[in-house]
Amino acid sequence: MSDADRPSPDALLAAARPEGRGKLKVFLGASPGVGKTYAMLEAARLKAREGVDVVVGLVETHGRAETEALLGGLAIVPRKRMDYRGQHIDELDLDAVLARRPQLALVDELAHTNVPGSRHPKRWQDVVELLDAGIDVLTALNIQHIESLNDVVARIIGVRVQETVPDDVFRQADEIEVIDLPPQELIDRLHQGKVYRAGTIGRALDNFFTKPNLTALRELALRTAASRVDDEMLRLMQASALSGPWPTQERVLVCVNESEIAKSLVRAGKRTADRAGIPWIAVTVMTPRHESLPDSARQLTTEALQLAESLGAEVVTLHTDHDVAGEILGFARARNASRLLVGRPRPRLPFGLLREPVADRLLDAATDFEVTIVAGEQRRRPAPVMARPEALGLNWQSIAAGTGGAAIATLIAQPIDMFGLVPPPSLVVIYLVAVLFVGARYGLVPALATSVLCFLAHNFFYTTPRYSFTIQQPEDVVGIVLFLIGALFTGSLAGRLRAQVATMRANQKRTAMLYDFAKKVAARSDLDDVLYAGAFHVAATLECQSLILMPGKSGALEQVQGFPSIVEEIDPRAQAAAQWAYERNEPAGSGTGTLPASPWMFVPLAGTGMIGVVGLQFKDPRRGADPEVRRLVQAVEDQVAVAIERTRIAADLENMRVEAEGEKLRTALLNSLSHDLRTPLVSVIGALSGLTSPDLPDTVRLALVESGLDEAKRLDRYVQNLLDMTRLEYGALKPKMAVVDLREVVGTVRRDLSQVLAGRGIEVDFPRDLPAILADPVLIGQALANVLENAAKYSPAGSTITLSARGASDMLVLNVGDEGPGIPPEEREKVFDLFYRVGDGDRRPSGTGLGLAIVRGFVEAHGGRVKALSGPNGRGTTVALELPLAKEQADGRYPDPRH
Amino acid sequence: MADTRILVIEDEAPIRRFLRIAVESAGFAFSEAERGRLGVEKAATEAPDLVVLDLGLPDMDGKQVISAIREWSQVPILVLSVRDAETEKIAALDAGADDYVTKPFATGELLARMRALVRNRKAPAVERSTIVIGDLSIDLASHVVRVGGSEVKLTRKEFDVLALLARHAGRLVTHRQLLASVWGPAHEEDAHYLRIAIGHIREKLGDDAGNPRFILTEPGVGYRLVD
C-alpha cells in the first residue's frame, strides 16, 4: 500500500469529533508475544460479565492455546472472505460489525493492511469508522507501528516496518494500556513455544527477538506512554486555566524538497514538534524549475508532504521565481516559526557554481532562527543527483537536441569558415546562438549539454591544429575557455527563462480557465448549463475526466453532468466511493484513503450544505494524490459549488416569487368570484321575487324588470370574461383571422353595449379611407367591448367617449378616450394585470379586474399592443390599441361591382 | 297565428319552460322535444312551421339533426348557440340552418327572429315588389333604391347584394350565400368582394358601419338587413 492512501486532514478532523463517538482503548506492546491480545480478551470478558454487549470483530490468536481459550463465550462476527490473486484472505467484516451495532468491538492488530478491494486500505481506518458509529473499540498495537517512530525503530532493529498507524489515531485513544513484559521473560516464552508454534522460532529470534532490540523497544513503548501522560496533564492544565494572553505559539517549519531524505526529514519534524509540544508546518517551495522536473522527482515531494499531512502537519506550498531561501524565511517569520528543519545540503553539482544550495543560503540568512540540519538515513547511499540522469531532464530528447544543436552550428560554420568570411575565433558566436536556441527550446540540461558539445566541436574544427582536440595557441586556450563559461551562462539563463515562461503559461492558462468559467456561469441561470460548465471547468483545469453527481429523487447519487460525458456504466466501487464522499463530506476513491480501488476520485461538493460530489479520473492515477493537485481540486470544487449554489438560490427566489404570485392570483380570483358573481344575482333574485307580489304599479314593475335584466346581463359579461380569461390562460385561444373593417366591429359592439353606453355620448372619428385590419372580428369585438365598458364605468354620465383611429405603417391605432378621473402614470401598466384595479375601497365602481387583462391577451394574440395613456386634453384615460393592418389591400384586385 | 306551430328541440327543462311561455304568449302553438332523435321524429310527424334547435344536445350533434330534417323538409330552422362557438355556428348554417340566436338572448330578439323566418315562409318576399325599411325603399322589379325619397345609384352587383338582403329582411344572410348568389359559386371564398360592396352600399345609403341603421354586421358570419 502506497503512502498515497494516507488519510486527509479532514478525515483526521472528522475522527476527532468527540460527540457520540466510541471510545478507543489501545493495548500497546513493545513487541509481539508480550500478551496484548490476551490482555485485550480478558478485558473484554470482564466487560461482557458487566453486561456490556461485546463482539469479537477480529482477533488473531496465532494458534496460542491460552489465548484461544479466552475467546470462548464471546460473540464472534464471522470474518469476511476476500479473494485476492487467487488466495482467500479473511478480513474484518466491517459492515457486519456496523450492522450488529455492539457496544464494544474487539479489533486486533491496528496496523494491519487490508486486502486491496476492501473499503479502507488500512485496518485503523476501519476502527475509526467503528468509533464514528459510536462503537467502543479495543485494539492492540506494537510500538514499532507508530508512524513517527518508524525511523527510530528502523534504526534499532535494522528493518523498516511497512505497516504504520498515524500518530493522531494513537494520540486520540481514550485509554492506553502498556502490556509490559521484561525481555528475558519474553525470550523464555518464545522458547517455550508460547508465542509462535515450534519451527518458526529460530529465525524470529535471530532477526528480531534479541535482548538489545527488545530492551530498546520496551523503553520506547514506556516512554511513549509516559509522554502521552504528560500531554494529558498539559491539556488539563490549559483547559482549566483562565483565558489569558497565551504567548503566540511557536511552530516548527520543515522544509521539504525533492530529496531522498524528505520523508525522514518529515518524521524528524514530527518528533521535534511533539517534544516541544507545538504545531508544525511542512513547506515546499515551487520554482519554475519544478515544472521541468521529472515525475519521479516530484513524487518524492508529494509523498513527503502526504506523510506530513498524515502526521498532523499543516502543509503549505510556496511559489517563487528563484529565491527559495528568502521565501522560506519570509514565511517562517510570518508564521512565527523559529525552528527550521532542513535536509543536509546535497554535494555540489559539477555545475554547482551556478546555483548555491538552498540549505547553505538558509544557514547564511537565517541568523535569527534555530536551524536543524537532518542528515537522513545513513544506511542508504546518499544518492548524488547526477546518478539519476532522468531527474535532471537528461533523456534521449535532450541529448538529441544538444547533439543536433552542435551539429547544425558546425554545418553553418563550415561554409563561412571555408570562404574565410570571418576569422575562425569569431565562429564561436554561431555556437553561442545554438546554445541559446537549445536552452530556450528544450531547457537547462540540454543547453548545458550543447555548451559542452559546442565547446568540443569548436575546439576540434576551428582551433589549430584543426581536426584534433589539442590546442597550440595560448590565446586559443583562453578563448575556448571563455567560450565554455559564456556558453554555460547563456544556456543556464535560457533554460531558466524557458522554465519561467512555462510556469507563467501554466498559471495564465489556469487564470484564463477560471475567468472563462466565471463568465460562462455568470451568463447561465439554468442549473443544467452551470453543471455542464462546472464539469468542463474541472476537466479542463485538472486535465482529467470529470463527473458531477447529485442526489436524485430517491436520495441515491446520480450523475448529472460529465466531461467529456456521463459514464454509462460506472464501476460499483466508484459509486460506493461517491456515496461515501457525499455522506462523510470527505474525499474518497482513487488517490485517497477510502476505497482507493475505485477508478475515480470523488471530492464532496459542498457550499452551505452538501450539494453532491465531483468525480475525477486522471490518466495517471498518482496525480490524484499530489497535494498540489488536491489543492487545485479544492479550489475548483469551491468555484463550482458557489456557482451551483448561486443558481439554486436564484431559482428558489424565482419559485418563491411565482408561488407568491400564484397565491395572490388565487386569492384575487376567489374574492372576485365570491363578490362579483354574487352581487348581480342579489339584484336578479330580488327583482324577480319582487315581481311575484300582486298589484304592483306598472312603473315599479318596469323598474324591477330593468334592474334585474341589467344585472343579469352584467353577470353574463362577467362569466364571459372568466371564460375568455380561462381560454387565454390555457392557450386555447386561436384567433380566426379575417380581413375586417374596424367600423363594422365598432357598430356591432355599440349595438351589444347599447344599455351600458346609454347616457354617454359616443364620438367616432375614423377617416374615410381607414385601412382594414387582419383580426378575428369576434375577439377584437370582445376586446373593444371591454375597453368601452371600462370607459363608461369610470366616466361620469353625460360625458363623451371618443373613438379615433388612424393607420400607421403596418399597424392601425385605435384610441378610446374617456373623461373619467384618469389613471396615475405609475399604474398605467398595471391596469392590464389580472385582477388589478385602480383605486381602492368601496368608492371604486364594481368590477372584476379581468376586463383589461383580457384586452391585452386578445390584442397580443393578434400580434398587437395595448397601453393606457392620459386622456385627450390631459383629462381622463385613453386606451390605445394597435392592431395589424391587413396586408392585401383589396383595391385593384376587386372586380368592380359596377360590372 | 295559433295555426303556426313552433317545435323546440332543447334538453334543458328550464329553457323549454321559459320558451313555452314566450312562444305561447306570442300566439304560436308550442311543441317540444328534449332529445335530438325525438326532435327529428316530431319534425316529421307534426310538420311544424319553425324548428328552434339547441346545438348542444346530449344524444345527437346539432348538425346531424339539421341534416336529418333537411333530407325531406325545408322548414326554417333557428339555431340556439353559445358564444365563442363561431365555428359551430357557421357549420350549422352551412348544414342548412336559417338563422341563429346566441344564448343568453332577450325574448324580444328571439321572437323577432322567429317572426322573420315564419313570415318569409308564409308570404315569400319574392312576391312583394317593393320592400320598405324606414326611409329606405327597394323596388325589386325596377331596380330603384331610394333613401328618404331621393334615388341612390347602385351598381348591378351592389343592387344584387342589397336585394338579396332585402328579400330576407330581418334574417341572417351568410357571406357564402351572398357571394354564391351574386358573384357565382366559384367566388364563395372571396370575402373581400363582399366587404367592399357592402362598404360602397353603406356609403351610398348614408349608413354608418360604426352605428348602422340598415345593414347589420354579424361578425365573421354574414349580414342582416334590419326588419
Image (spheres, coloured by chain):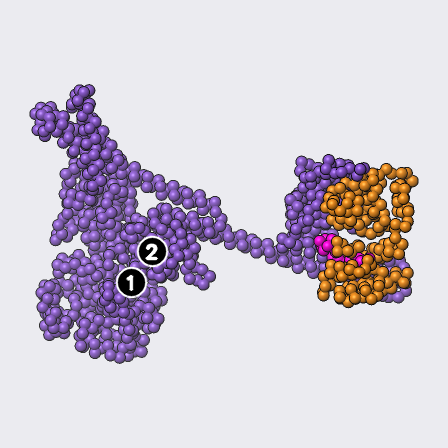
Chain colours: A purple, B orange
Which corner quadrant holds the C terminus of chain A?
A: top right
Callout 2: chain: A
Considering only vertical position in the picture, is A881 above or below A119?
above
Percent of width and height locating residue A116: 26, 62
**Foreground residue, A240 or A450?**
A450
Considering only vertical position in the picture, is B115 above or below A761?
below
Write down the residue under mark 2.
A600
The residue that appears at 84% across and 39% down in the rendered structure is B154
**Foreground residue, B92 or A349?**
B92
Which corner quadrant holds the N terminus of chain A?
A: bottom left
Residue occupying the far right of the picture: B149
Asked whether residue B80 is drawn in magenta, I would say yes
* Category of crowding for the residue at label 1, using alpha-carbon neighbours closer than 10 angstroms: few (below 14), some (14–19), many (at least 20): some
**Foreground residue, A326 or A392?**
A392
Considering only vertical position in the picture, is A508 above or below A841?
above
* Residue type, numbered disc 2: Trp
Percent of width and height locating residue A296: 22, 48
Image side of residue A78 versus residue A355, left or right: right
The residue that appears at 82% across and 59% down in the rendered structure is B75
Residue stretch rendered in magenta on the structure = B76-92
How many numbered markers are drawn? Answer: 2
Considering only vertical position in the picture, is A425 above or below B227?
above
Write down the residue under mark 1.
A117
* Residue type, numbered disc 1: Gly
> Do the residues indicated by labels 1 and 2 lie within the same chain of the protein?
yes
The residue that appears at 70% across and 51% down in the rendered structure is A851
Image side of residue B37 versus residue A641, left or right: right
Q: Earlier in the sequence, mark 1 or mark 2?
A: 1
Judged from the image, the secondary structure of the residue bearing numbered disc 2 is loop
Image side of residue A874 versus residue A370, left or right: right
The residue that appears at 18% across and 50% down in the rendered structure is A261
